[in-house]
Amino acid sequence: MDTLKLASQQLQKLEPHGRTEMKLPNNGFLFLEHDVPYLIVYRRKTKDRQTMRLAKTGASFLILGKDDEDYMHDFLLELVDRMAERFRSFLVVELEKRDLGSTEFIISGPYKKLPSTLDQLAKELEKIDIRYDAKLTATIVDSSAENTENGSPLFEESFLRVKGGTYVRLQIPPVYRTLENKEFPVFFRKFRTQFAKALQQSIYEFIRVQTTSKIASYHALGKRRIHEEVSKIDKEITAIQNSYSFLLLVAPINIENLKRSYFNNGFKNIGTYHYRLLPIDPDILKRKLYQLDIHEIDDPALAYIYDEKREEIDQELTMLKERGSKNFFYSSVRLYQDISTQLLKEAQLILNNIAEDDLASEKTDMDAYDFQKLAENEFDFFRKQAPDFRSKVHIRDDINIMMVAGGELYLPSGYRMTKMEARALIQHELGTHALTYFNGTRQPLQQLAHGLAGYDALQEGIAVLAEYLADALGVNRLRTLAGRVVAGDALLKGANFDDMFSMLYKEYGFAPQRAFDITSRMFQGGGFLKDIVYLKGLLELRDHLANGGTLEPLLAGKFALRHLTIVQELTHRGLLHPPKIKPRYLLNASCDQKLRQFKKGMPLHNMV
């Protein structure tokens, strides 16, 4: 066949770092990564789409059309010969589906040659969670005594062994289908993720022992290319996310008037919050969200992060429709979760051990234009590391808070601050938010710039730690973060506006202005827990670093700590990159010492 001749010619060009991708007759397909010494093979069967999708989770896979194996046999032997010549050995794993109702994997392979690989495969497969209380089992059958009741093998082991290859058949129990052959789609996605990990861990054992490959981790054995459909989903979900400003739309537009009235009334009767009109239709955006074929992504790691992000955007859109109602608060709890006992205790320790600095507001000696010079100097520092860094500083009359949006810094024209606050804001807003945005834009996935689901806590935790490492974390700043936590706890326990303000003002000694700011932010939308993430993120970051984690990999984009394993896996595969620019505070003489103290689990109230 002409196609087979073309495929054979392709084998003459298996250059390092390359890949071969081609269609084959009868709806077959070859995707071969030249630097990966294994291939997953699937022989197409009717009504067996799930097994084919399991095969396509591999870095290299071959889908054979119906009845293709006879004329593909010599091509595969040639492929194994070429790859084994380069890597000393090459593994072929064929996936097949077992009968409905089975809960047992059957692993057929040369056990005497690969005892550790096959034993690990069985062990990892048995860890896969199954619905209800059933348990999966895995049985190893030596290929020399193989039972062929489920069909003949693709290769005779002896033929492959001469070429330097090893052949393993893996028969998979379709526990993701009912006895009536109906799919459990949500369970299948979970099964696929765990199955891919089990297979990759076991294949890595083979690679480590049997080949000359320099692959250093099983994390590198997943897909090494971002499919164009994934890039399309990435752009579309980012466009939906960027079509509205969630925080702006849940912030009241009449808060200054409410504050004056509240203070004039002796700290009573807050009045009614008013919000901006919605510039989008949440229902239309939700429709667009669920038209994205995220569940068709064959890479389980990428499918997970986009599915999770879609759910978060869905929750935000629901909350926009619920502004001003109690349902907004319930949705906020779901989005930002509860306050742990440890987090509340740390917040209370801060407030009980640190007194408010009543004179701090009188020390403001820098304006927006002074700060602009500092910010531009910081941007120049970034440009020395990355000449393509393009962010600018904008001083505006139509905003009332400092913010970073799209990597750009926006300053209110009347903004004033102390020199210490300026240092803190430089490392918080630029050294963290603008920096991770830029690093995220240099990733192949736009979501790393705009934020994976739940990224806020880690972002704010790093930003507050940056203030500390830059010797700029102030007393009132840390107290404010703690105050937000105790206010969030009060909100969860049913406190009203007056109760919360009184607690902060009278029990914890906050000045009326700060007590109002904390309370008013906590009640925006109908009850908003986002402000707990600052101290929560700092606490989680301290625990992560205390357990051996490092700071720099967390600067590669905007993601949550729970995504770190996925980010590391995608980096191992070459799909993501280490951070391109790093913050200035890492160069401070005191940084290493302060970071070591923080890693040891220092109480947060000792940070000032």
Image (cartoon, grey):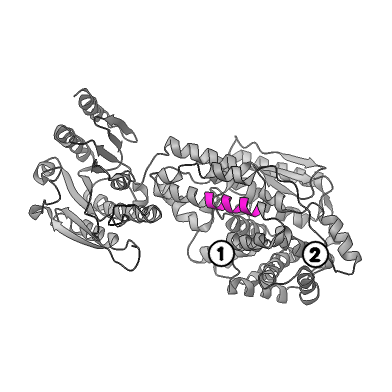
Mark 2, Cα crowd under 10 Å, few <14 / some 14-19 / many 20+, is many
- The secondary element bearing badge 2 is classed as helix
Left or right relative to 218: residue 348: right
Q: Position of residue 77 (x, y in %)?
A: 16, 36
In the image, the segment drawn in magenta is: 310-320
Q: Is residue 590 visible from the viewing direction of this image?
A: no
Instruction: Say which quarter of the image contains residue 588.
Output: bottom right
Please determine whether, in this image, residue 467 is positioned above or below residue 436: below
**Would you identify the image quadrant in which residue 486 lies?**
bottom right
Q: How many marks?
A: 2
Q: Which residue is pictured at 66% across the width and 49% down the height?
A: 246
Q: Nearer the viewer, residue 430 or 348?
A: 348
74, 526: nearer the viewer: 526
* For marks 2 and 1 on the same chain, the one whose residue lies earlier in the sequence: 2
Q: Is residue 73 left or right of residue 516?
A: left
As drawn, the residue found furthest toward the front would be 180
Classified by dominant secondary structure, the portion drawn in magenta counts as: helix
According to the image, label 1 marks what residue? 540
Magenta-colored stretch includes residue 316: yes
